[in-house]
């Protein structure tokens, strides 16, 4: 007699938008080996190393890259071809003024909701508190509403010896994510470990595989 095989279950893919701070302070040295080096590892270098490793570990997901300072640019729109993010690396340098984090998060959210399929996540990588925003209170309310209505989870990585900025941390927590701090004197590997932590914290959902 013929028997029917059980349906195949696969992990539900995620759409992950990396929101990367390119303000001038991201050129500051990072890691103990950079203290007296002629070629110090910059915060932006360590961030890109960690991003590349994280992307390589999630081959089933789509990624995009938004960079920001006073304005934001979707440098790499959401794509399953993550080589585009790797090729963008030579252009990643802290050269922008201001840190309009809320504006960049709103832009990344708008970009994510254009994808009707797959789960949605934003990972913010920054070394400073938001500034130069036109109306922070209104922007926060709108962001939280969008996160809730569109099922977007926000995680943050803060590269600084300073305390994690309160407002950005609240946004992360209320979305269902969290914000984590890595200090300059830590090993560059510490950034990669935070991405691994986020990967482990993010809920995994499964779905039936569509028949071919």
Image (spheres, rainbow, N blue to C red):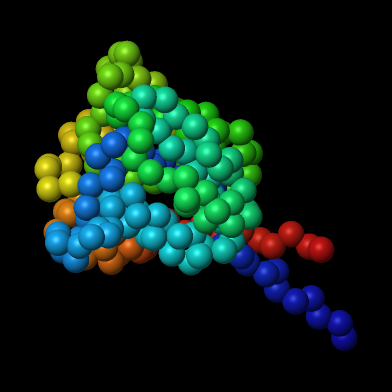
Q: Which percent across, then down, holds residue 20? A: 39, 42
| x, y percent for residue 184 | 17, 54
Q: Is 71 placed left or right of 37 in the picture?
A: right
Quadrant hosting residue 51: bottom left
**Position of the N terminus by quadrant:** bottom right
> Residue extending furthest bottom?
1
Q: Nearer the viewer, residue 48 or 144?
A: 48
Q: Residue at x 18, y 36 (%)?
A: 165
The answer to whether 114 is drawn above or below residue 205 in the figure is above
Query: At 26% across and 63% down in the image, what residue appears?
Result: 188
Q: Is residue 68 visible?
A: yes
Residue at 48%, 66% in the rendered image: 57
Q: Residue at x 70, y 73 (%)?
A: 6
Question: Can you give x and y, in whole percent of width and height, for residue 155 in the image?
Answer: 34, 46
> Which corner quadrant of the image does residue 53 belong to?
bottom left
Tally of numbered tags: 0
As drawn, is 193 to the left or to the right of 53? left
Asked if residue 135 is positioned above or below residue 52 in the image, the reply reads above
The spot of residue 133 in percent (x, y) is: 30, 19
């Amino acid at each position: 007699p013929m028997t029917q095989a059980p349906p195949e279950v696969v992990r539900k893919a995620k759409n992950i938008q990396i929101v990367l701070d390119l303000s001038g302070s991201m050129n500051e040295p990072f890691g103990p080996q950079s203290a007296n080096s002629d070629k110090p590892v910059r915060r932006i270098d360590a961030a890109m190393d960690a991003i590349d490793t994280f992307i390589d570990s999630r081959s089933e997901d789509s990624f995009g890259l938004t960079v920001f300072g006073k304005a934001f640019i979707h440098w790499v729109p959401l794509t399953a071809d993550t080589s585009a993010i790797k090729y963008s690396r030579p252009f990643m340098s802290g050269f922008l003024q201001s840190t309009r984090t809320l504006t960049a998060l709103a832009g990344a959210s708008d970009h994510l909701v254009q994808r009707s399929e797959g789960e949605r996540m934003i990972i913010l990588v920054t070394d400073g508190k938001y500034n130069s925003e036109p109306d922070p209170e209104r922007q926060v309310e709108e962001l939280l509403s969008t996160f809730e209505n569109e099922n977007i989870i926000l995680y943050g990585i803060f590269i600084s010896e300073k305390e994690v900025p309160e407002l950005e941390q609240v946004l992360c927590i209320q979305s269902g994510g969290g914000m984590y701090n890595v200090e300059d004197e830590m090993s560059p590997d510490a950034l990669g470990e935070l991405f691994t932590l986020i990967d482990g914290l993010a809920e995994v959902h499964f779905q039936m595989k569509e028949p071919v």
